[in-house]
Amino acid sequence: MKLVRAEFLKLRKRRGLVALAALLTIAPVVIGYSALSYLHATNPADYGPAGGTDDLAGAVELLAQIGLVAAIIVGATAGAGDVGAGVFRELVVTGRSRLALFAARIPGGLALLLPLVAFAFSLAAGASIALAGSDQAPGPELLLRYGAWIGVGSFSAFLLGVGVASALGSRAMSIGLLLGWQLAAAPILLATGKLDAVLPNAALLRLEPGDAGRPLSISVTTAAVVLAVWTLVPLAAGAWRTRTADA
Amino acid sequence: MNDYIVETEGLTKRFGERIAVDHVDLRIPRGSAFGYLGPNGAGKTTLIRMLLGLTTASSGTVRLLGRPVPAERAEALARVGAIVEEPRFHPFLTGRENLEIVAAARGGEAEGRIAGALDRVGLGARADERVAKYSLGMRQRLGVARALLADPELLILDEPTNGLDPAGILEFRGLVRRLVGEGRTVVLSSHLLDEVEKICDAVAIVDRGRVVWQGPIDAITEGGERTILLVVDDETRARPVLAGHAAVASTAQTPDGLRVELVPDAAEHAPADINRRLVEAGVAVNRLEPSRASLEERFLEITSRLEEAA
């Protein structure tokens, strides 16, 4: 537990990281609902109420897109922060198991990330109900499913960040690589419609409670397996590298 | 209890074709300040990294505190503190928080030692400032404080006076001697001969990855070439007497007098015989004393002999 608290301390004291993670999770929801509310208030004929089920889907998808960037950055920082600062060897000379040092990065990082994601989602959920107006407000079951979905998405992106950064030993390189994949390569490959069975973003879309926007050719089970592989393989690589690399 | 706190046998580290540490057999006695002395690139840090399990050995064995490493690495390192190269910290954390991170990894009573360790190195008053604001000397001292969290039986310090000003170096020497006085063993890796000579009780000299000499500092400075320092009333008359003596290998003028190097197999009473010959030749001998080689001279002598052999 002390190791986890130490990991959390290292992350929460990075003021820039905390500000960026908050910005990338909470700001899209706040800005999105503020814009929709403004449009509805100024032009109710063309723009319906800001809340309701449809706008909840849009807000959560936006949170998934931008919030996953935060998850990757927090994960990469947790994964490579000690190595980057040269502190990892100082921890290794304590005699503590390297795998224990690696494992502590996961709950330590989640302790920073998940409250931000949960807060952002709570804002979206609250707004979707409070601003539903004449539209259908989401029920508890749909809210729970969306909450679980954004949780799974954030969790898997965070683990991907931890694993890749631990394996590469470089925070900057890992963030660059993963954001390039997440924001450029993966959407292009998804658009081809031929690689759904191997792409993590296809898997995440398949698991989305609402309409994914286009038909996906994979089952829920396949989607779960794809997501698991995309998180467990990098994690295993990161653990192996942490255990075996010269410190 | 084993007399040696560190024992290595045939310890070797290869990086491809290059051998950084070459069959090192090292025995470091408990309760001493031990210098691991060698020029830059001699393999000092690589050896320390192997002792601490930061890198694996290509071959050979290590025992720390009587325990085999890496088999019982965790147990051995529980009472070992170390600074390897320049101590590194998270710059956005305070000095105290950086120690909390390491204390969390150490577990046990380490957390309770933080305040005492900070006070001991004189950082108690500035412990709550971010490390980014620390000078290099303060970081070195924080590194020592971090090493003390283990309540170490063995402290391994790699080039610990880097970045310290003269007052800091003096203070550091005192700290090391106090730690040794408490029964701890301090291993000091350095390329600074003067520093090792002033702090350490025993030394190992390493050159190109190999330990070429180890033993007490007194033994190393007494060994080697036998020389005597002569102060006479008339050096011009003394020189031919010395040149004609079978025990004299060479004579050199120094600011302190004539430095007379004896041949390796010179008899024990050779200095007395030289004195008698000088007096018989009418030269007044004001002073005659064995000249004690400095560690620096012995170090250069040993390493240059190796270069010639190579």
Image (spheres, helix red, strand yellow):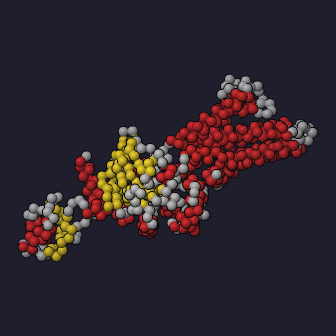
Q: Is residue A184 something that shows in the picture?
A: no
Name the residue located 43 percent from the left edge and 67 percent from the top edge.
B181
Query: Vertically, is A148 above or below B142?
Result: above
Q: Residue at x 93, y 39 (%)?
A: A134
How many circles with numbers are drawn on the protein? 0
Q: Which residue is drawn at 61% across and 47% down?
A: A104
| Above or below, A133 relative to A217 | below
Residue appearing at x 50%, y 42% in the figure: A245
Residue placed furthest toward the front? B1
Q: Is residue B84 left or right of residue A54?
A: left
In front here: A200 or A226? A226
Q: Which x, y percent locates residue A182?
A: 66, 36
Q: Position of residue B259 (x, y in %)?
A: 19, 66
Front one among B249 and B55: B55
From where the camera sits, is residue B309 visible?
yes
Query: Looking at the picture, does residue B46 appear above or below residue A201?
Result: below
Tell me where residue B127 sits by quadrant: bottom right
Which image quadrant: the N terminus of chain B?
bottom left
Q: Which quarter of the figure has residue B178? A: bottom left
> x, y (%) of residue B254?
21, 67
| Left or right: B148, with B212 as reference point | right
Q: Is residue A104 left or right of residue A142?
A: left
In the image, B295: left or right of A66?
A: left
- Residue B76, given in percent of the width and then of the height, sits at 48, 52
